[in-house]
Image (tube, rainbow, N blue to C red):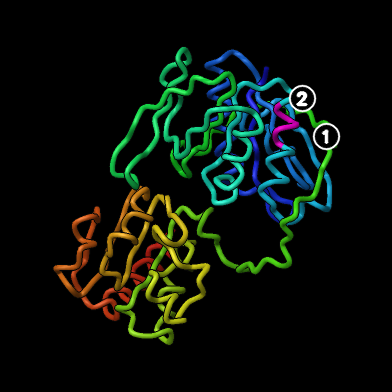
Amino acid sequence: MSVLVYTESEQGKFKKVAFEVASYAKAVADQLGTSVTAVAVNVEDTSALANYGVDKVLSVKNPVLDVFNAKVYADVIKQAADKESSQVVILSSSANSKYLAPLLAVHLNAGYASNVVALPSNTSPFTVKRTAFTNKAFEFMQINTAIKIIGLSNNSFGLVESSGNATSEAFSPSITESGIKVESVDKVTGKVAIADADIVVSGGRGLKGPENWGMIEELADVLGAATACSKPVSDMGWRPHGEHVGQTGKPVAANLYIAIGISGAIQHLAGINASKVKVVINIDPEAPFFKAADYGVVGDAFEVVPNLIEKLKAFKAQQ
């Protein structure tokens, strides 16, 4: 009857979000008076999960799972839920988990709540708080099915360490390859991934051209941040499409989002509105982004950003 959590990984190592969903699962399990079982796929060392409240790890090793396939992964997690008789299954709100969650809900005949931002406020009926209307409002949703699936919004709960000693068990579910075959996956290497980033530095058309992107990358490097861009920038080929954030690109739920030279179209704001603190640097005081930002700097980015980088470097040198 344990709470089951799917812990995402890449190249044999857990993503940051894996530890956040494990932390959340531990808190839910404490509410329900039960334990936490994690599903880990092709992870070399699963021991770190014990630091976030996981009691048991179902370790799946199969080369077929090296490339993510929503249908196959949903079936694996379904078999794990059946094995553990889990009544609550917890996923992240990453793009991959949002693909597989509806399929898993069908497999388990379960209710699914996405973008959940808090612990259940009630367990009978089971009630969760989630964002709605592109993060402009909250709603309280009851899940009345016997099995419940929760998609935790990124950076909403945080990492909560909880000492423990997770046992690891080899789990070999039956795997049937679907008709969908992924030929290749292009990944950005050597940089902080947008999905895992606490801080995101994003640039728009106000930078005037790809040749000026060096200061965006330098600011991101100083802050340990991911780089991103608006849709027009990726459409013009200044930056790769993998950096496009917004409603039609990658959603961002960072602790700090810095927008430089981005006017703030409604689609962009809808995709980054879940970020906790939003800072905008723009020469146009009438830019729509200023209405949504927590902090704003009206000024030329080519003057403001280099000065900001210089101040941050000086501050870090004093630490």
Between 22 and 85, the one lying in front of the other is 85
- Check disc 1 and give the amino acid type: Phe
Q: Where, by quadrant of the figure, is residue 8 drawn?
A: top right
Q: Provide residue 201's location: percent of width, then percent of height.
A: 40, 65
Label 1: state its secondary structure. Answer: loop
* Residue at image mark 2: 83
Between 292 and 140, the one lying in front of the other is 140
Q: Which residues are magenta?
A: 77-81
Residue at 33%, 78% in the rendered image: 205
Return the mark for residue 171. 1
Q: Quadrant of the N terminus?
A: top right
Q: Nearer the viewer, mark 1 or mark 2?
A: 2
Circle 1/circle 2 CB separation < 8 Å: yes
Image position of 39 with respect to 290: above or below: above
Label 2: state its secondary structure. Answer: helix
Residue situated furthest left in the rendering: 286
Image position of 47 with respect to 166: above or below: below
Residue at 77%, 44% in the rendered image: 45
Q: Quadrant of the C terminus?
A: bottom left
Q: Provide residue 59's location: percent of width, then percent of height.
A: 79, 38
Image position of 295 with respect to 146: above or below: below
Return the mark for residue 94. none
Q: Provide residue 193's location: percent of width, then percent of height.
A: 55, 60
Residue situated furthest front in the rendering: 179
Image position of 180 with respect to 102: above or below: below
Compared across the picture, whether 166 is left or right of 123 comes to right
Q: Provide residue 255's location: percent of width, then percent of height.
A: 40, 50
Compared across the picture, whether 72 is left or right of 307 comes to right
